[in-house]
Image (spheres, rainbow, N blue to C red):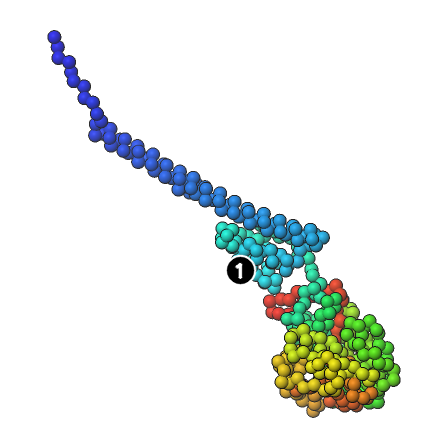
Amino acid sequence: MYKQKKTQNGITLIALVVSIIVLIILAGVSIAMLVGNNGIITQAQNAKEETEKADVKEKTQMDIMEKELENEGDISKGDFIDILNQYFDDVPTEENLPEDLKDLTLTSKEKYGGHEMNIGDIWNGTFAQASLAETVTGTNYGDYVDYTIDLNGDGDTTNDWRIFYNDGEHVFFIAADYIENTSSYLDNVGTGMSTYSSYGLYWNPAPTAQTVNSSTLRLFKQSWTGDYSTNNNGRCVSTLLNTNNWDGFVDNSYADYAIGAPTIEMWVASWNTKEYTQLYTNTNETGYYIGNTESSTTYRYRLSNNTGYNDTLYFPHHSGTMDNGGTCWGYWFASPSAYDDGNLLYVTYDGYIDYTEHIFSLLDIRPVVCLNANITATKGADNIWRF
């Protein structure tokens, strides 16, 4: 009879250590699968981010497409920026929008995940060019324009012309300063005007009546119904409103025509658009009244105590000027005065809209240019508009 050998049950220490090592390895693998660069959690986060980006991209593209359908396949910069502002933070202005949208990276709003996205990957088409009349507002009145006519002969065409008025169809520029009467652009001034010193342009005697186009008057808001062929002041004004006299200021690539000075109605319309002290014009048989009531019957108006007085768009040479011995007190309006049939309206450097006889030699002109209705231009970062 033999003894049965006892068997030992349980885990040896070595086996336990091996098991623990295996479990640690498995845990490490599992954790790596969850949180590693290619882990489940990371992949889930990446998928969430890509989904949010795709959602923003789709929404933006759909809004752009909808706007293009509304505008026969076009979208303006303004509309494009409005759409971007719905989905992204810190969207640039029209002036600062890069030409190539691949150069623009924005962060989506927090509710869309706050992700950096390249805008050129969403849309990088060509913007529709809005006409200048669709672009310019009253806040742009006084902005300088790079127009080709170099009035002061300094070789710089960005300091000679300023936006003066927009009637919704046409934009009008005005000379930034008085015109020296030796300027080569005044070749036709001999048809009715006399010169004095460096800056004086006047009438002595009053000229014969010249052609005044009715469509020109409509654009310049001239509503006086008097006869330009009879009164001395009307005949003088006719030389300022006869567009043939001011062809020297017209670049036919951009402009339709020019006149020698703003009419009082256009000047007042521009002034009122900038929300300065409200002005009104009124007329009688010889010309215009000017004042702060609709039924004004005053012949002159003092603006020096009003908010717009410091705006050099309306009052160049705020303190007056002396050039080559000649004094320039202000500039003519292309509008007769209601005072009598020999006086015209003018504006002085010290803030008066006043009247004087046509033989007064210490006033000059500031030509106004009417641009093509379909002209386009863009305001640059230097605040100068360029075609």
Query: Residue at 82% of width from left, 87% of height from top?
Result: 341
Query: Residue at 84% of width from left, 77% of height from top?
Result: 212
Q: On the picture, is 263 further left or further right than 380?
A: right
Quadrant in which the N terminus appears? top left
Q: On the picture, is 84 further left or further right than 181?
A: left
| Total count of labels | 1
Nearest to the observer: residue 176 or residue 211: 211
Nearest to the observer: residue 89 or residue 145: 89
Q: On the picture, is 337 further left or further right than 126?
A: right
Can residue 161 be seen in this snapshot?
no
Quadrant in which the C terminus appears? bottom right
Query: Residue at 73% of width from left, 79% of height from top?
Result: 294
Nearest to the observer: residue 91 or residue 185: 91
Q: On the picture, is 102 further left or further right than 249?
A: left
- Toward which corner of the image does residue 276 lie, by quadrant? bottom right
Q: Is residue 31 shown above or below 141?
A: above
Q: Percent position (x, y) of residue 190?
A: 82, 83
Q: What residue did someone put label 1 on?
A: 90
Q: Percent position (x, y) of residue 289?
A: 75, 83
Can residue 260 be seen in this snapshot?
yes
What element does badge 1 sit on? loop
Q: Percent position (x, y) of residue 287?
A: 80, 83
- Toward which corner of the image does residue 34 lie, by quadrant? top left
Query: Residue at 71% of width from left, 83% of height from top?
Result: 291
Q: Residue reaching furthest bottom?
A: 325
Q: Is residue 189 shown above or below 113?
A: below
Q: Amino acid at mark 1?
A: Asp
Q: Is residue 324 shown above or below 103?
A: below
